[in-house]
Image: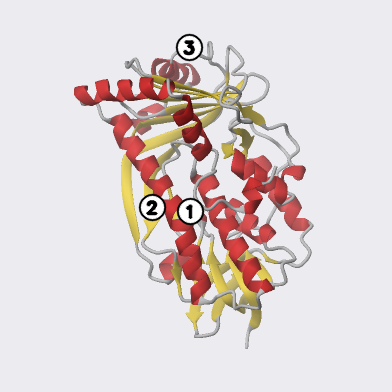
Amino acid sequence: MDDLHDIAIVGGGLVGSSLAIALDDCGFRVALIEAAIPRVADQPSYDERNLALARASINALESLGVWAHVTSQPAAIERIHVSRRGEFGAVHLDAGKLGLPAFGAVLPARELGNALLLRLDASASLDRIAPAQLIGIERHPHRIDLALRDGGGARRLSTRLLVGADGTESFVRNSLAIGVQRIDYAQHAFVTTLTTGRPLNGMAYERFTDSGPVALLPLAQNRAGLVLTVDADDSARVAALDDAAFLQLVHARFGYRAGQLSRPGKRKPYPLGRVLADRLTAERCVLVGNAAQTVHPLGAQGFNLGLRDALSLAELLIAAKQQGDDPGDAALLSRYVERRTPDRQATTSFSDDLVRLMGNDFLPLRVLRSLGLAALDRIAPLKRRVALRGMGFRGDVSARALSR
């Protein structure tokens, strides 16, 4: 028999690494397979991608020992302003007034990636296999054989449970013939960092327009993370704009709530769509993160949702080890699906519905939309419930996410 592991995680990105850390020293033999050589990126860039981390995600990262390796100061999200251009309704969420800690924090993706790598370096029992590319899967009743290509040529290993954490175009998912439902939003997002004329002081903005949403996220030192959504057929024109013209477009869409914007970083368009796997499991296989679902960046739920996948799966696997159960047992995978389905459906549906609702220019809907936002802004208990859901406290919440 090939080198046998209890669990093999394919994909060492943010979600796959988080899962591996959650399983560290649990008693199972775990392999983390990653196509690229893990390297800590020392140099920040002005235009780097930023992540809006929900409070539940921060709690979990603290519990996993990852947050202690974050070297820069995360920018807390203490207030959120949601509006639509040309309409009177708006929602203002203030964590302090709702009796909550900060809703979350903004952190460069590079920083979180570095922290995960440093925590992985301290892992007690994890087998890290990188660089290695998965090129074949062969399923048997009691194990799965994996064919890998690494720097030394071919390699094989076997596992009792295969976890696909390998992204939107997952090789694992495709090899298992798990279909997907795809939605093309016909939009592209430009992600960059810029300088604000006035400090955001913990304020995050979500501004909807006829051409798509604009998000501004607080960072340190009068910097802000920007996500500008444009129609796909306008993407090439926007990509060709110089800095001054790009800032003019941002101001036209967002206004001057943050003062005069300046110093935009490099930017390129990313096509936006939704990809949902038809099912989360196959025999001795399970999907997590973007391999299971890739959502519109609206509401910044992508990584937060994927981390909740990883935490739920880790809890079930640790319990299985304590009970002497098989990690690839069909009943365990069924429990994972049962546990994750409500959160997955609610989050992906909310994101999709919000894109369609806020992008519709039908006049009666504009009036109803404004009335709805204005009403929500006046109902504190409902605002608190919405805030808690956005903070990741929904459904069957992992114990790690509840920690303080």
Question: Residue 332 versus residue 353: which sits nearer the camera?
Answer: 332
Is residue 307 shown left or right of residue 347?
A: right
Q: State the mark number for residue 6.
A: none
Tell me if residue 110 comes above or below residue 163 in the rendering: above
The residue tagged 2 is 275
Pointer 3 or 2: first along the chain: 3
Q: Which residue is mark 1?
A: 290
x then y, percent, for residue 403: 68, 46
Q: CA distance from mark 3 to mark 2?
A: 35 Å
**Mark 1 and mark 3: Cα distance apart in space:** 35 Å
* Type of amino acid at the residue the image marks with label 2: Val
Label 1 SS: helix
Q: Are marks 1 and 2 in contact (CB under 8 Å)?
A: yes
**Depicted 164 relative to depicted 185: above or below:** below
The answer to which image quadrant residue 208 occupies is: top left
The structure residue drawn at horizontal position 74% and vertical position 50%, both measured from the top left corner, is 65
Residue that numbered label 3 is attached to? 256
Count of numbered labels shown in the rendering: 3
> Dot 2: what SS?
strand
